[in-house]
Amino acid sequence: MNTDWTIDIIFIVVIGGIGSLEGPIIGAVVFFVAREWLADFGAWYLIILGVVSIAVILFEPRGAWGACRRRGVPDLLPVGYGPLATGPRPLGAIGFLPIGGNQNKLPGVGSRPAP
């Protein structure tokens, strides 16, 4: 398997940011534009991309879209993880524990029968 694509994808996510759809889209645009601009440098473009990614990790760990979010730009495609709007539901309401009866005791768990 070719590792070039793996390195490219990691660069795209680092530059754009993780946790949203906008980040990798921005990272992909930056990556392909930078690759075209740096094509005349031969293999040196990989070193330049590495230096850029290290700078982004050091100065803006959440990537380009994370910097935009911090400055108040709302998500264009809001699919990230966040707190529930309605608050947590009891476990019995979502089917983990039986409704009614002794919910503190699980079947088959607890004191052992006397020998």
Image: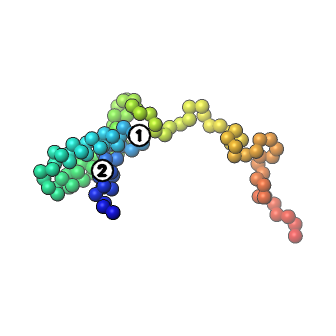
Amino acid on which disc 1 is placed:
Ser
Residue ID at (13%, 53%): 41
Q: Nearer the viewer, residue 93 or 60?
A: 93
Q: Residues within 10 Å of mark 2 (few under 14, many from 20)?
A: many
What quarter of the picture does the C terminus occupy? Answer: bottom right
Q: Where is residue 27? Give x, y as percent.
A: 30, 43
Q: Where is residue 106? Give x, y as percent.
A: 76, 53
Under circle 1, the secondary element is: loop
- Scheme of colours in the image: rainbow
Q: Which residue is mark 1?
A: 20
Amino acid on which disc 2 is placed:
Phe
Q: Residue furthest bottom?
A: 115
Residue ID at (24%, 45%): 32
Q: Residues within 10 Å of mark 1 (few under 14, many from 20)?
A: some
Residue ID at (53%, 36%): 83
Badge number at residue 10: none
Q: Is residue 22 left or right of residue 30?
A: right
Q: Is residue 19 above or below residue 49?
A: above
Badge number at residue 11: 2
Residue 66 in view: no
Residue ID at (29%, 52%): 8
Under circle 2, the secondary element is: helix
What quarter of the picture does the N terminus occupy? Answer: bottom left
Q: CA distance from mark 1 to mark 2?
A: 15 Å
Q: Where is residue 84? Give x, y as percent.
A: 56, 35
